[in-house]
Image (cartoon, helix red, strand yellow):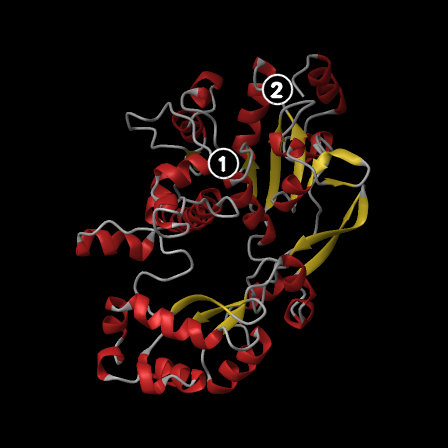
Amino acid sequence: MCAHPWLSRLDSALEGLRVLDLSRVLAGPWTTQLLGDFGADVVKVERPRSGDETRGWGPPWLPGSPSESAYFLSCNRNKRSITVDLATEAGQDVIRDLALEADVLIENFRAGTTAAFGIDPATLLERDPQLVYCTISAYDSGSARRDEPGYDAMIQASGGFMSVTGAPGAEGRPQKAGVAIADIMTGMYAASAILAALRSRDMSGLGQHIEVPLFDTQVASLANQNLNYLIGGKVPGRLGTAHPNIVPYQAFATADGELMLAVGNDSQFRACIAVLGVADRLGEERFASNAARVGQRDEVAGIIGESIARRTTAEWLRAFGAAGVPCGPINSLDAVFASDYARDQQLVRTLHHPGDPMLPTVANPVRFSVTPVCYKQAPPLLGADTDAVLRQWLRYSPERIEQLREEGAI
């Protein structure tokens, strides 16, 4: 039974929360998509005519709509789109009015831009002390690097991620992740920080300014690799699929493909070598502990690799699974979405979009017991909700809206 009866009257966890989204590309939109999934009313502000630049980051495109890229569609559901020209004074007035009605504002402009437009944190928090204002930046606005631009790939490179990603040895090259991991992680940090600030506001009555820099986030996200260096004193290198602190924990070639072996403790290791039939070679005391195996990584991996190469991936998955040894296939996305698990868990949902009434979207992984994730709105067409938002949030009259349109402000 629900401990708080009023929860049963909510359709979603963030119902009634208003979010003004001035961000673009990925880190900011990922943040606001999460908030929208949890029920917030997210208004995405875009430039007239061109909109968020990711609308043009294709192919692939939504069929029949060259302004709706798959990239844009991946991170902008559960939002409404309005167009405002911030280069005009009237457009800046509109944003200031919207900010007064918002609980949260998020932006990722270049340093100094918001002050030039009169929508900086100091200005807006003075007008509304309860506002939670979130800035996503490349580098902290108080640092000497505040004016530098930041895109995901360059942050992955300069923030250390690429130095530990890629094939080992002189023949290997540093690699970026296959997705924009710095942007995604920044979006996750920003969303959790916004929720923390809202909780603080519930208790104090005051909002605050949050800043989440991409570079700082990328460094923080290196987790154990950071402490491997800070405590161990050795600069981590690239290990391909292998783990710096666990052995065996890497991909191995089978007779017909590859699989990922993830042996997380010593008992799993004993089960692993029994399945592989190499207990006579790897059952010695010198391999008994993970710390010992890390020190003899190449020898352990070589013996395991010889054995795994003799049978198919499917055979090993069955054998390891029966013995409780963690491992998995290296699936391409077609295999991921065709799996029984993906179907049973509804990892692909559909949204109604003007260009495709069955637009696919990938499910948010969070499962709430009382306030479910929302899949209420497909990513919006550019400016589709301008009039509705100005009427609902600001109570602008039709005449005022038409005047703004004639002035080029919206």
**Circle 2 residue:** 85
Residue 346 sits above or below residue 179 on the image: below
Say which quadrant the N terminus sits in: bottom right
Instruction: Label 2: state its secondary structure.
Output: loop
Q: Position of residue 261 (x, y in %)?
A: 45, 71
Specify whether residue 304 is in view. Answer: yes
Q: Residue at x 71, y 40 (%)?
A: 60
Q: Residues within 10 Å of mark 1 (few under 14, many from 20)?
A: many
Q: Position of residue 198 (x, y in %)?
A: 44, 48
Q: Position of residue 200 (x, y in %)?
A: 38, 49
Q: Residues within 10 Å of mark 2 (few under 14, many from 20)?
A: some
Specify whether residue 212 is in view. Answer: no
Instruction: Label 1: state its secondary structure.
Output: strand
**What type is the residue that disc 2 sits on?**
Asp
What distance separates the C-alpha of mark 2 from that of mark 1?
Answer: 17 Å
- Tell me if 344 is positioned left or right of 174 in this view: right
Q: Position of residue 133 (x, y in %)?
A: 44, 36
**What type is the residue that disc 1 sits on?**
Ile
Say which quadrant the C terminus sits in: top right
| Residue 304, quarter of picture | bottom left
User: Who comes first in sequence, dot 2 or dot 1?
Assistant: 2
**Circle 1 residue:** 106
Task: Between residue 159 and residue 396, name the one nearer to us.
Answer: 159
Task: Between residue 20 and residue 317, name the one nearer to us.
Answer: 317
Q: Residue at x 33, y 32 (%)?
A: 140
